[in-house]
Image: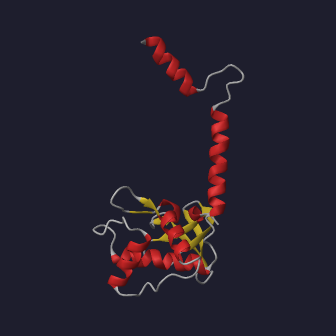
Amino acid sequence: MKLKEILTISGKPGLYKLVKQTGNGVIVESLEDKKRFPAFAHQKISSLEEISIFTDTEDMPLKDVLKKMAEKHERGPSINPKSSSEELKSYFAEIVPEYDEERVYVSHIKKIIQWYNILQKNDLLDFEEEEEETSGEEQSGSSQAHEDETGQQDEGQSDQSTKEENS
């Protein structure tokens, strides 16, 4: 399953699978108890693919954090999210040494660990499938960009030649 199909809903605990889009929201299924219910457009709904973690340099996608956690635990369960604040900070520093300690709070770390454990429990930590799809899309995109066998230039080349002609 793709991370863009796994949702978090503000004010509701846990993670949800996108089942169907409706006119004014979505139908979701809880990954914990498998119950389905509507989530409306006025609720803050985010896919895990959209979430990133503040670091000292640039933001790190949540997917990369989850991958590092999966590697550390050999796809097994993580630590207890109810551990002490110091244990959670120390643990997260092992996973993402460059995380921004001023902007990433203990509550964020707990939530990420809870999400990881839910994904692990539901056997949804298969990131290779997404990487293959992404690289497949990139390959098809790059082959389309270089279709100049017909003698036509792609937009990037025509812009370049126009700039050269004008100078």
Q: Which quadrant of the view contains residue 98?
A: bottom left
Question: What residue is drawn where x is 54% and y is 68%?
Answer: 67
Above or below, 52 against 156 in this view is below
Query: As drawn, which residue projects farthest toward the left?
Result: 102
Expressed as whole percent of the image width and height from the top left, the position of residue 61 reads: 47, 60
Q: Which quadrant of the view contains residue 166?
A: top left
Above or below, 119 against 163 in this view is below
Q: Nearer the viewer, residue 105 or 22?
A: 105
Expressed as whole percent of the image width and height from the top left, the position of residue 14 reads: 51, 78
The total number of labels drawn is: 0
Q: Is residue 47 visible?
A: no
Question: What residue is drawn where x is 64% and y is 62%?
Answer: 128
Q: Nearer the viewer, residue 84 or 52?
A: 84
Expressed as whole percent of the image width and height from the top left, the position of residue 51 reads: 46, 63
Question: What residue is drawn where x is 66% and y is 43%?
Answer: 139
Expressed as whole percent of the image width and height from the top left, the position of residue 112 reads: 45, 74
Position of 50 compared to 134: left or right?
A: left
Question: What residue is drawn where x is 62% and y is 45%?
Answer: 138
